Amino acid sequence: MQPTALMPSTEHLALPFFEAAHRDIAARLPEWANAQGVDETDDRAACHDWVRRLGEGGWLRYCVAAEHGGALPRLDSRALVVLRETLAFYSPLADFSFAMQGLGSGAISLGGTPAQQAAYLPEVARGGKIAAFALSEPDAGSDVAAMQTEAVPSADSAGGWRLNGTKTWISNGGMADFYCVFAKTDRQAGSRGITAFIVDKGASGLDDSAHIHVMAPHPLATLRLTDCAVAGDAPLGEVNGGFKLAMQTLDIFRASVAGAALGMARRALAEAIAHARRRNMFGHTLADFQLTQAKLGEMAALVDAGALLTYRAAWMRDTQQGSMKERSVAAAMAKMTATENAQRVIDMALQMHGGLGVMVGSKVESLYRDIRSLRIYEGATEVQQLIIGKAVLQ
């Protein structure tokens, strides 16, 4: 990541959705993020570096509650949104590294025993352990209940469990120190027969070496579990309660995905404005043309539309406004709108740059690749549309 003189907007922090703790993050984080200068040529090495730096800087403390070394009394959705929006403005890999510490350990925060929380969460907060969330499978992405990975009690006298199956599209796969793995413990019970387990790197029967290469490089891998042995105290939360735990974890972080999209969209808009002001055409700057002004106006409105839905969703979760269903619908609206709008904003910014926009190494070119996956992971746009549509019909 190369340092940039561009700074993210902070005007939205005056909105009543935010409190002093959130404004404090937004005041301190840009200068820190802009000064890091992480070499992102190798995405895995870069993510290791980012986790270390985020831990040393105290930013990972927002991924866990205060009792486990966190910065705030509990996981705070608005803090996650502000952090991800700011980090994504500078570096989507920095955002990824931060987000996965929270998502990867979220099930432990929500459902872990005191011993599990004490063993993992303080390490997550200081960057000592890298976390991963292993839910998706080759034939079970949006349809979580279709998962085939199975966990059965061990036959030996030592107790414990044996896991068999395949997980894929696992962020931090191959570099995580532990995985929160979801598996069927009752094949006949559908989504009510899933349990979460902590699986440490190096566990017997775990193979996380199959890296997945994607258009915007970041650490992904397929996990293969072959009679993978875990201890009797490895389950997270209640046996057969894993589906609810997974959904609760995703609900906390869904609005933060929208925050990451906002950060990328704000960066694209800032790049477009800077380019329009300096690009000379026909004796004028590009910014002098009404067509350019209209396009920038549309981009700004798209960013704000996504932002307002995102901040509302995070505020509703933190303050327990509305029912659980209403909060889930608000998060779905935010995730859908912010990611789809960011894709449009970044595309328009690239178009405004002309040939420079598709040149490998330019910021808008990398943003164009970075934004695409946000419309898919943690609930594709089509899944969010279904959530919202069903709620409207009811």
Image (cartoon, rainbow, N blue to C red):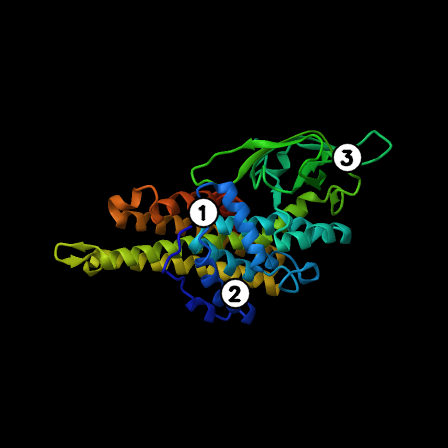
The CA distance from mark 2 to mark 1 is: 24 Å
Of tags 1 and 3, which is closer to the observer? 1
The amino acid beneath tag 1 is Asp
Left or right: 324 in relation to 32: right
Residue, far left: 283
Question: Which of pointers 2 and 1 lies earlier in the amino acid sequence?
Answer: 2
Left or right: 222 in relation to 240: left
The CA distance from mark 1 to mark 3 is: 41 Å
Question: Which of pointers 3 and 2 lies earlier in the amino acid sequence?
Answer: 2
**Is residue 298 visible to us here?**
yes
In the drawing, what numbered circle is on residue 161?
A: 3
Question: In the structure shown, which secondary structural element does the residue marked by tag 1 occupy?
Answer: loop
The amino acid beneath tag 2 is Ile
Name the residue nearer the viewer: 382 or 175: 175
Of tags 3 and 2, which is closer to the observer? 2
Q: Position of residue 108 (x, y in %)?
A: 69, 50
Residue highlighted by disc 1: 39
The amino acid beneath tag 3 is Trp
Mark 1 is surrounded, within 10 Å at the Cα level, by few (under 14), some (14 to 19) or many (20 or more) other residues, namely some
Q: Where is residue 149 in the image (x, y as percent from the top left)?
A: 67, 32
The CA distance from mark 3 to mark 2 is: 42 Å
Of tags 2 and 1, which is closer to the observer? 1
In percent of the image, x 12 and y 54: which residue is there? 282
Name the residue nearer the viewer: 272 or 375: 272
Tally of numbered tags: 3
Residue, far right: 157
Name the residue nearer the viewer: 224 or 28: 28
Question: In the structure shown, which secondary structural element does the residue marked by tag 2 occupy?
Answer: helix
Question: Which of pointers 1 and 3 lies earlier in the amino acid sequence?
Answer: 1
Residue highlighted by disc 2: 25
